[in-house]
Amino acid sequence: MIIEEHIAVVSGGASGLGEATARHFAAKGGRVAIVDFDFDRAQVVADEIGGMAVRTDVSDEKSVGNALAEIESTLGVPRVAVNCAGVGMAARIVGREGKPSFDVFHKTLSVNLFGTYHVMTHAAARMMELDPLDDGERGVIINTSSVAYEDGQLGQSAYAASKGAIASMCLPAAREFARAGIRVVAIAPGLFKTPMMEGLPEEVTDKITADIPFPARLGDPTEFAQMAEHIVVNRFLNGTTIRLDGAVRLPPR
C-alpha cells in the first residue's frame, strides 16, 4: 500500500514520534487525522498539514470510538492506523518508604496498552468493511512498543510491561486480521529526540547517547516516521516487532 491519497489516523500525533509521523504521511500525500488528548496542539499540527484533529482520551474506549466515528464521517475510514500515544511514568514497584506504585502501573497500562488496543480495535473493525485494494490489502496497523520491553530499566516495570504487551499481541493480532487483509506491525524505538528527552540536562543526554553504538546520538523522530512509511509500503512486513535503536541495549539503570 502507498500512503498517497489514503487516510491515516495517528494517535499521539500532537507531539514527538506521532507528530513526526503525521507530518511525514501528509507530506507523502496522505490525509491524516490526529487523535490526541492535547487538542490545542493537535489542531496546530493538523492545520499545518491539512489534516484534522480530534480530542481523544485513548484510555477511554468510548472516546476512541467517538473519535473514529468523527474521522469516518469527515474524511472516511482510515486504511492506516499508527499508535503513538503513550506515557513514560517511572516508579519503583515498592518505593523507598514502602509505598507501592499501583497508581502508576494502572495509569501506564491504561494509556499505553489499553489505549493502543482501543484504537487498533476500532480501526480494524472499520477497515474490515472496506473494499480490498487490488493486492487484497485492506489496512495496516502500526503500534509503538519500546526497547524497554526487552531492556526495561530500574523503575520501568509498568512501562516495560505495557510495551511488552504491545509487542506480544502483534503476532496474534496479525494472524486474526490476516483473513481481512490487515497487517499488524510494532516498532520498538530506542532513545529518540522527543520532548521528554529534550528536557533533560545536557550532561544527562551525553551520558545516554554514549551507550548508543552507532550512530551515537538520539534517534530523530523522522526516522521513526520513515520506518512507519516503510511498514505501510512493504506488504511482507507483518506480525513482528522491529527494534529501531542504533544497536543500543539499555543498562539496568
Image (cartoon, rainbow, N blue to C red):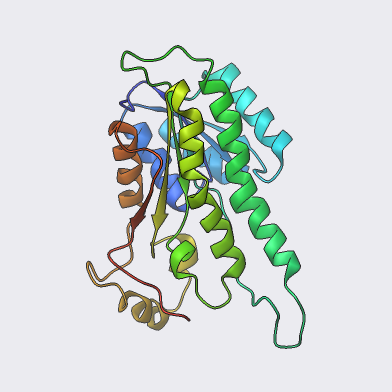
- The spot of residue 129 in percent (x, y) is 54, 15
213 above or below 162? below
150 above or below 208? above
Quarter of the picture containing the N terminus is top left
245 displayed left or right of 184? left
Among all residues in the image, which is located at the extreme bottom? 97
- Answer whether residue 37 is visible to the viewer in this image: no
- The spot of residue 105 in percent (x, y) is 68, 64
221 above or below 80? below
Q: Which residue lies at the image location 46% right of the left edge and 23% below the top edge?
A: 179
For residue 93, what is the image quadrant? bottom right
Q: Which residue lies at the image location 43% right of the left edge and 51% below the top edge?
A: 17
Among all residues in the image, which is located at the extreme left? 214
245 displayed left or right of 152? left
Q: Nearer the viewer, residue 95 or 183?
A: 183
27 displayed left or right of 104? left
Q: Which residue lies at the image location 64% right of the left edge and 77% below the top edge?
A: 92
For residue 109, what is the image quadrant? bottom right
Q: Nearer the viewer, residue 166 or 221?
A: 166
- The spot of residue 44 in percent (x, y) is 51, 40
Image mark count: 0
- The spot of residue 74 in percent (x, y) is 56, 19
Q: Nearer the viewer, residue 24 or 143?
A: 143
- Answer whether residue 216 is visible to the viewer in this image: yes
